[in-house]
Image (cartoon, grey):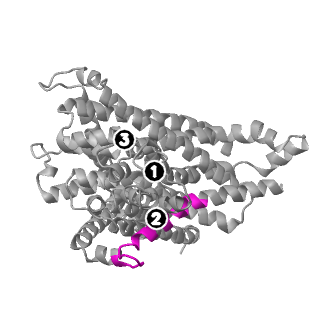
Amino acid sequence: MTNTASPRRIPWDALAVAPFIIFAVMFLFLPTLGIIGAAFTDRAGSFTFDNIFGLFTDQILAAYWISIRISGASAFFGALIGLAIVLAIIRGRLPAPLRSAVMTFSGVASNFAGVPLAFAFIATLGRLGLVTIVLKFLGLDIYRSGFNLLSFWGLTLTYLYFQIPLMMLTIAPAVDGLKKEWNEAAQMLGASQFQFWRYVGLPILWPSFLGTLSLLFANAFGAIATAWALTGSNLNIVTVLLYNQIRGDALQNPGLGAALALGMIVITSLANVIYLVVAARAERWMK
Amino acid sequence: MKTNRFWAWLTFALGAAYFIVPLLATFEFSLRMRRGTYSFDAYASVFADPYFVSSFGYSVVIGLVTIVVGVLVVVPAVYFVRLRMPWLRPFMEFITLLPLVIPALVLVYGYIRLYNSSSIIPFTGSALGTDILLTGAYVTLALPYMYRAVDNGMRTIDIGTLTEAAQIMGANQAQIIGRIILPNILVAILSGAFLTFAIVIGEFTIASLLNRPAFGPYLVGIGTNRAYEPAALAIISFIITWGAMGMINVLGRFAPRTSARTD
């Protein structure tokens, strides 16, 4: 069999990998290159930087800025709170079954995003939501004291529902990697708990923390469904602006729309490059 | 040490409250439809809506096709790259990271520009073409998760030895993939499949920009027109997500047995 195989052998390797490559070219490379090309093309079809310069208007810069702030705030608080919960569960020696239940729930909650999440928060903190009513009954009218679900903090609070679990799922292996022996060794050398965390624990977790932070940022930056279902087209974040542009050429300039999309790719790429570089450094500690 | 545990429980309790209260509040809200008393009227209203049935059915079908296409694209590629072309691995890892880097909104913008009715491949020119484009978009969205699941599955079994053993017994290439490799990584594939399903079933952005009657755009429509049905739909969606993730967890318990099985 081995003698006759070589001349008429079917090139299985190439045949099997081809669909994957064709798929990547059709649904990832060409569409992205198309956007990048269009961002540098004017209406007549010649090369231009005008679309990029066109981004520097008050409306567009404000949209980018609100998006960056919401993504940054939800990533920052999500990472902080997620880390705190993971530390509490793993290092605080809470019962083991609790840990597996929490991790399963995190898997569900990190995927419970988009439109249903917006509905859930309207039912909770909307004007007729249960928490709003209960707080009003207790004498605290959150809407009169300035809270609004359809605002920066409202959206950030909603995003935390998928950011915190995502942080927990990504950071748990790193926290597991903090060996008990390190804590014992530090104690034997006379270190307090605070000193252990200050000089051993947190410096080891730092790269994983920073890496996941940028992952969470990119995750929130590209999100639109939750914001759309929550606020409609009112909120001027960059995804909503681009959505309106795709729907009905809201900027009245296709090239500018492409430049807007290119700007998003640049920002999420930066966040992911930081993630990859920092995550590679963090893995050294895992071994 | 005692204070340590106290803080641990307090942190856990505050976290749990943040995650459980919205679910309880949503459930309570969904029961408020009939005045003065709790009832399941909102759920009855949802299930009686023909658009709920049709949009949900549409998304389920697209989700299943997405899973099948995803498996067909990913499994053979991962198998042959692991077995014969390890130099392609970094390239594949790069490709499967891209959908996490490029927002879905930007990708669909690219599709609409590239595959419009006056292009070489006019996907958006017909309903069937747009369905194919939507499926392709969803396979792309699920690519990072499907790739990682399949790649992990193949790591736990020794595909080199399995392949050689099968070749010595006289199996051809299709038999090796279909009857040796696939059954051995079935648990991994199913995990990827359930995750894909959870992502696709309520997806809004791509479906709405491609104008397809999917579950995500239906949800947004209900959100702007009704008061209590959205809460009921949020609970239903949560149960679906929970079901898909629960299946992955249950399957995970079978995974080690699969890798040890040599019969």
The amino acid pointed to by label 1 is Tyr
Give the residue pinned by disc 1: A143
Instruction: Indicate the position of residue B247 as horizontal and vertical percent values.
Output: 48, 70
Q: Which mark is residue B102?
A: 3
Q: Secondary structure at mark 2?
A: helix
User: Which residue is depicted at the point 23% across and 21% down?
Assistant: A50
Q: Quadrant of residue A185?
A: top right
Q: Chain of mark 3?
A: B
Q: CA distance from mark 1 to mark 2?
A: 43 Å
User: Which residue is depicted at the point 60% across and 41% down?
Assistant: A209
Q: Nearer the viewer, residue B32 or A91?
A: B32
Horizontal side of residue B230 vs B263, given as left or right: left
Structural crowding at the residue carrying mark 3, measured as other residues with C-alpha within 10 Å and reported as few (<14), some (14–19) or many (≥20): many
Q: Secondary structure at mark 1?
A: loop
Give the residue pinned by disc 2: B191
Q: Nearer the viewer, residue B256 or A34?
A: A34
Q: Going by the picture, which residue comes out furthest to the front?
A: A139
Can you say whether B108 is above or below A140 in the image? above
Horizontal side of residue A257 vs B86, given as left or right: left
Q: Which mark is residue A104?
A: none
Instruction: Indicate the position of residue A247 as horizontal and vertical percent values.
Output: 20, 44
The amino acid pointed to by label 3 is Ile
Q: CA distance from mark 1 to mark 3?
A: 37 Å
Q: Quadrant of residue B252?
A: bottom right
Q: CA distance from mark 3 to mark 2?
A: 24 Å
Structural crowding at the residue carrying mark 1, measured as other residues with C-alpha within 10 Å and reported as few (<14), some (14–19) or many (≥20): some
